[in-house]
Image (cartoon, rainbow, N blue to C red):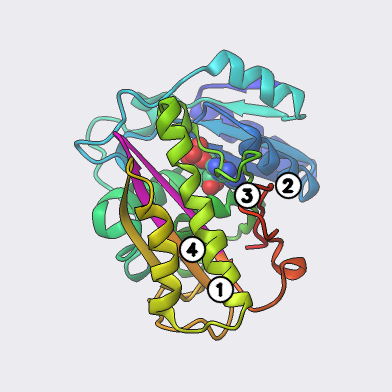
Amino acid sequence: METITDIRQMQQWADATRSRGQRIGFVPTMGYLHAGHLNLVRAARSHSDAVVASIFVNPLQFGTNEDLERYPRDVRRDTAMLLDVGTDVLFLPEAAGVYPPGFQTTVTVERVTRGLCGAARPTHFAGVTTIVAKLFHMVKPHVAVFGCKDFQQLVAIRTMVTDLNLDIEIVGAPIVREADGLAMSSRNAYLSATERQAARSLSKALAAAQALVEHGEVDGLRILAAARRVIADESLARLEYATLADPDTLEEVDAVRRPTLLALAAHFGRTRLIDNCILSRESTARTGWRKSPDSQLSTAN
Ligand code: AMP
């Protein structure tokens, strides 16, 4: 595995790889990797000849009172994990090159970034789409893989790619979870033991909602009430939102008559976590859900 830190060198590698007729697959991350990230690398491999994974903790997507400074970092461990899973290039751009003095250009996707996480984090998605657009110009991928864990981010990036006519295929990969259902996240490292227990309420809330839908419930208020109740039962959990939305437009809906996004954000102490699933009347065999909230959950979204 080659490690590249220089942006110009990354572009030259991309040009040389493309001129050999090889497809470039790309997985952008902020590091402190876990099995969810590695699954994205595997997915990228299956769509390409050479895989680039980037690690860049992007200051532009953190709000002023957010966790930029304490965001976990361990490049040595990440490097070993990426090597192990068969990554061709680890791209570690330096912040000074990414945001040089005088930088004043951003990419903003409007409607799909307003609700859900965008309501509490109004500048976050412009930071994400800007860095992803920039990384796309550095790595020049044919295909890029993003996790459904950050569902709104995936929709924002798909929208950017369509709206700006970018010639890049976007692949969404399913959420990878811990054995007890908690969606893997670099931020899980912040959780105390009791917060970690309480954080299980997120996936339990999704499972409760999915169980209701499978029993024929379509009313959005009742489905959301069931999800909220599970989280309210955890004294350490503070719900930020529980929202039902159309998975393509992210517009809120009040009934589940077709596959519908249920997205959650909650705070556990100082740590903000998100989770989501696609609710569907189809049985678990189709959606990928298992009945028990304690079993390994995976979504087909
Ligand atoms: P991050 O490093 O958290 O910015 O995430 C980098 C990429 O990994 C994004 O596309 C995320 O959606 C994806 N990702 C993070 N956690 C998971 C997970 N548990 N399952 C699948 N993808 C994930």
Does residue 122 appear in the picture of this structure? no
Mark number for residue 155?
4
Quadrant position of ligand 1: top right
The amino acid on which the numbered mark 3 sits, given as a three-letter code, is: Val
Dot 4 falls on a residue whose secondary structure is helix
Magenta residues (range): 264-277
Dot 3 falls on a residue whose secondary structure is strand
The amino acid on which the numbered mark 2 sits, given as a three-letter code, is: Ala
Disc 1 to disc 2, C-alpha distance: 32 Å
Q: Are marks 4 and 1 in contact (CB under 8 Å)?
A: no
Q: Are marks 4 and 3 in contact (CB under 8 Å)?
A: no
Magenta-colored segment: predominant secondary structure: strand
The amino acid on which the numbered mark 1 sits, given as a three-letter code, is: Leu
Disc 4 to disc 3, C-alpha distance: 12 Å
Q: Is 38 a magenta residue?
A: no
Per the image, the residue denoted by label 1 is 212
Disc 2 to disc 4, C-alpha distance: 18 Å
Per the image, the residue denoted by label 3 is 145
Given the current orientation, which residue lies at the most extreme left position? Answer: 64
Disc 1 to disc 3, C-alpha distance: 32 Å
Q: Are marks 1 and 2 in contact (CB under 8 Å)?
A: no
Q: Position of residue 256 (x, y in %)?
A: 51, 81
Residue drawn 38% across the image and 35% down it: 58
Residue drawn 66% across the image and 39% down it: 179
Q: Are marks 3 and 2 in contact (CB under 8 Å)?
A: yes
Dot 1 falls on a residue whose secondary structure is helix
Query: Which mark is nearer the camera, 4 or 1?
Result: 1
Q: Earlier in the sequence, mark 4 or mark 1?
A: 4
| Residue 181 versus residue 196 in the image, above or below | below
